[in-house]
Image (tube, grey):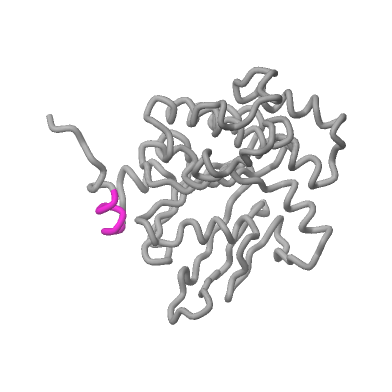
Amino acid sequence: MTPVLELKDAAVRYRGTAADVVADVSLAVEAGESLALVGESGAGKTTLLRLLLGLARPTAGAVRFDGAGLNPRDREQMRRFRRSVQCVFQDPYSSLDPSRRVGAIVAEPLRSLGLDSRSTAAPKVAAALERVGLQADAVDRYPHEFSGGQRQRIAIARATVCDPRVLLADEPVSALDVTTRVKVVDLLAELKQERGLTLVMVSHDLSVVASLCERTAVLERGRIVEQGATSQVLGEPGHPYTRRLIESVPRLPV
């Protein structure tokens, strides 16, 4: 089976730096699976997510979508890619335009991709908000009228309104309190199951990774040092760095 997204020997070096931020990364994301990218801050997780989202280009290697190299100059390919791959960002307070009503925010992908007009988008927006547990009257309200967890649900509605195949999530629950975090994780699991979403998630929270992701890739200083089934990687880590990550998780004293 051809992976829906793939990195092949990918490297990124930012202008003015002497070393690669990520180097020699090969990673395949199969349709319908859930993959976590874990590692310390600065390990290169968000850079990999930017590559997979098409927001950054590799200085070496390739990014592939449905087996073909991702080419920003190929307008037809990029249109299919943008419809198929959507993202939920870390901070629900900054990822939503405070000057726009929720209905317009959620409808934005439909209109920017040329899928719907304002009138034809309305039923899809209502359905997307309902899927994430928000009432129909949310469309007429502004982001500041909602709690942090509700804002992240709005962001998830926006990302899924155009029925993408892949959802990329950059620390989607780290800005939320513990109780709200659990509810949003449960929501992502439900959407993945019901809609057959492929999920790629960056997370520092190994408990979230264990509950949501089938596979895990561990990054250290821009390189993948271990990857495989999450139960194996977190349960029986084979690399010293992975063991250190697991040992650093805070635990209540017995």
Is residue 145 within the magenta segment? no
Percent of width and height locating residue 236: 30, 46
Q: Quadrant of residue 195?
A: top right
Is residue 241 within the magenta segment? yes
Percent of width and height locating residue 8: 58, 67
Q: Is residue 10 visible?
A: yes
In this rendering, position of residue 46 left or right of residue 142: left
Q: Residue at x 45, y 37 (%)?
A: 173
Q: Residue at x 51, y 61 (%)?
A: 47
Q: Is residue 35 visible?
A: no
Would you place residue 175 above or below residue 184 in this image? below
Relative to the observer, which residue lies in front, 12 or 145? 145
**Which residue appears farthest toward the front when viewing the image?**
99
In this rendering, position of residue 171 left or right of residue 64: left
Percent of width and height locating residue 162: 74, 38
Q: Residue at x 55, y 26 (%)?
A: 146
Report the span colored magenta: 239-245
Q: Residue at x 65, y 46 (%)?
A: 86
